[in-house]
Amino acid sequence: MRQGWAPRRTGAPRTGVDQFLTVLRVFAVGLVLIGLAAFIAQEINTDNAFARWANPDATGLTGAQFRGLVVSGIAQGAMYGLIALGYSMVYGVLGFINFAHGEVFMMGAMTGMITSNKLADAGLWESNFIGSLIFIVIVSMIVCTLVAVIMERVAYRPLRGSPRLIPLITSIGVSFFIQNASIVLLGPAAKAYPDVPDWVKDKHTFIQIEGSRILVVVVAAVSMGVLWYLVEHTKGGKAMRAVAEDAEIAALMGINVNRTIVKVFAVGGAMAGLAGILWGILFRSVIHTTGFLPGIKAFSAAVVGGIGHLGGAMAGGLSIGVAESVGPLLILEPLGVSGVSQLRDAVAFAVLIGVLLLRPAGIFGERLPAEDRT
């Protein structure tokens, strides 16, 4: 298993690809360093020569603006991390990427929208917001768990022994099926969550963080802690780790591999359902394509953190969330790039490319199934 930099055979000559990758690494690191230097120069004094050379129109960021960007990035990154957990767990056990996992997240957001609006019609959303929120979280997690389990049983289990490309293509087909099923059942228009109480929209603490962002970060942190305990200290979690290590040996030791794989999909689906509710509370709108871009970014987060590593999935999500929130104004705008607010997605995927160039195995390294190790 590769850890960190890709290994090179002793005495092997450097190829043109090696040289090209070295140039890319130097360019990426140099661009980030120049952008940071320009940002610091503009924060110190926008009239100095370096700041004028980099971007004469730059105004810099105030402390409050920078804090807001970081908090926003952490909140959004926490949601990416929750979704990435499903990608990482499935890859760690089965060795393929379930690209339909983003649509499981969308189903969670849709379920929360329907349930919350029904509660709002009954007057319970306003009168008992915390109870209503707990209820829609439970409903969403149950629905997403069922969707993920059915997906595994119908679409993936019959392909268990097939070449790796076949379940990958199947997952893309399942993704489109769920998207179109959502259009047929709920229509193509965006759907809104009911209004939240003022304390959720108001800013709290001495650094003035919106209540919704505090809620997202706290729930994500608690969920990650619960999942860590489940995987590390329960019988089912030990079975998951055993199957991820070597499914054949785990079966010989008496572990029901099929049941364990179902549990992996169920836990990943539950985390996606929770992330869907947090997305709805934070952005208060959902559409049938809601799961596509967050799903791709969550997959990128799993790769950045180290595919198959649960802590790495959350760390990767936070890294991408903060980078896409802060990066455009911290690095690109000081260099005179126009329209930086439209480049959030480009920055997020640039982080993925940068990590793959500098540390191909991800921040925490890969955890692969036995048949993928070399």
Image (cartoon, helix red, strand yellow):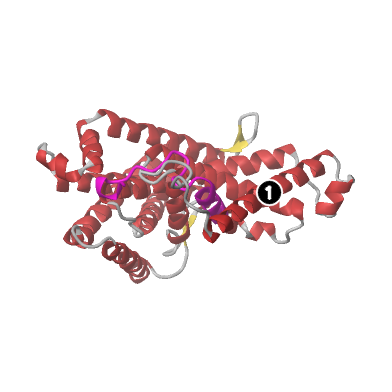
Q: Give left or right: position of 2 versus 336.
A: left
* Quadrant of the drawing holding the N terminus: top left
Residue at the image position 86 percent from the left and 45 percent from the top: 46
Q: Nearer the viewer, residue 132 or 309?
A: 309
Image coords of residue 37 (percent x, y): 75, 43
Range of the magenta residues? Answer: 348-374
For this orientation, the residue located farthest to the front is: 11
Image coords of residue 287 (percent x, y): 45, 63
Amino acid at the residue labelled 1: Gly
Image coords of residue 245 (percent x, y): 25, 40
The quarter holding residue 226 reads top left
Magenta segment: does it hold 360? yes
Q: Residues within 10 Å of mark 1 (few under 14, many from 20)?
A: few
Residue 139 visible, this orientation: no
Image coords of residue 302 (percent x, y): 42, 47
Q: Is residue 279 above or below residue 235?
A: below
Label 1, secondary structure: give it: helix
How many numbered discs?
A: 1
Q: Is residue 231 above or below residue 189?
A: above
Q: Nearer the viewer, residue 185 or 289?
A: 289
Residue position marked by numbered label 1 in the rendering: 30
Residue 146 visible, this orientation: yes
Q: Give left or right: position of 261 versus 77.
A: left
Magenta segment: does it hold 62? no
Residue at the image position 36 percent from the left and 50 percent from the top: 87
